[in-house]
């Protein structure tokens, strides 16, 4: 049986609260040997870390663009501290889920950009790849990646062109 890696699964979500262990076991039985669980805000850092360790999986820490309206400077500081504390944790594999969402109406794009760029810098400084949320925002995300180089990553929810996809690969 091939080994599959799920690079993006929010097992800490409320929907899984009642049967998260059974969900993880079913995935393992179907060949999913590793799951990366990205955080969406500082309030679920401990949950994704705990689940990853409990199941022998991996996790990422970050502030999702949909959570940027409620985030502040203290959240970025908490992320920086958590990344520093996890430096020796082999289960911490990325900064994420971060990015830009230009699909959901009413989100402050400037605020999203602020959190995106700050988290790119934290990822770069930590030497970690990123898990990017890319909803109708490929060009803006690429601009940030060109300004703040990071150590690779994953483009999640990507709906851009072939040209944009190749730019992410580069």
Image (cartoon, rainbow, N blue to C red):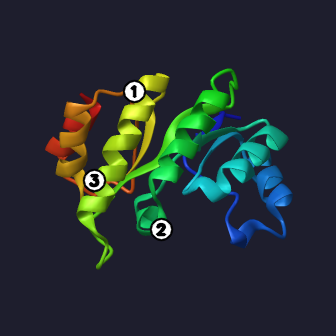
Q: Which of the two marks, 2 or 3, is nearer to us in this view?
A: 2
Residue at image coords 65%, 58%: 43
Dot 2 crowding, Cα within 10 Å, few <14, some 14–19, many 20+: few
Residue furthest front in the image: 74
Q: Residue 124 shows which numbered tag?
A: 1
Q: Which of the two marks, 1 or 2, is nearer to us in this view?
A: 2
Dot 3 crowding, Cα within 10 Å, few <14, some 14–19, many 20+: some
Residue at image coords 55%, 49%: 8
Sequence order check: which comes first, mark 1 or mark 3?
A: 3
Determine whether 29 is above or below 71 in the image: above
Find the distance from the CA under tag 2 to the CA under tag 3.
14 Å
Find the distance from the CA under tag 1 to the CA under tag 3.
16 Å
SS of the residue under disc 2: helix
| Position in image of residue 129 (x %, y %) | 45, 31
Determine whether 111 is above or below 28 in the image: below
Instruction: Please tell me in which quadrant of the rendered image residue 35 appears.
Output: top right
Instruction: Please tell me in which quadrant of the rendered image residue 58 appears.
Output: top right
- What is the number of callouts on the image? 3
| Position in image of residue 132 (x %, y %) | 39, 47
Q: Is 96 displayed left or right of 117 in the figure?
A: right
Give 62 or 168, whichever is nearer the viewer: 62
| Position in image of residue 40 (x %, y %) | 54, 57
The residue at which mark 2 appears reads as 70
The residue at which mark 3 appears reads as 113
Instruction: Please tell me in which quadrant of the rendered image residue 82 appears.
Output: top right
């Amino acid at each position: 049986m091939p080994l599959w890696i799920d690079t993006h699964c929010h097992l800490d979500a409320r929907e899984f609260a009642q049967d998260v262990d059974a969900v993880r076991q079913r995935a393992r039985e179907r060949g999913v040997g590793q799951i990366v669980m990205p955080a969406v805000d500082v309030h679920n850092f401990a949950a994704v870390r705990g689940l990853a360790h409990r199941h022998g999986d991996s996790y990422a820490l970050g502030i999702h663009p949909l959570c940027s309206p409620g985030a502040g400077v203290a959240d970025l500081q908490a992320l920086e501290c958590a990344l520093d504390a996890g430096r020796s944790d082999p289960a911490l594999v990325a900064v994420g889920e971060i990015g830009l969402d230009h699909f959901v109406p009413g989100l402050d794009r400037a605020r999203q950009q602020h959190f995106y760029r700050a988290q790119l810098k934290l990822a770069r400084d930590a030497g970690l790849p990123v898990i990017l949320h890319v909803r109708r925002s490929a060009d803006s995300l690429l601009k940030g990646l060109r300004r703040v180089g990071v150590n690779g990553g994953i483009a999640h929810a990507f709906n851009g062109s072939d040209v944009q996809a190749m730019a992410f690969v580069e």
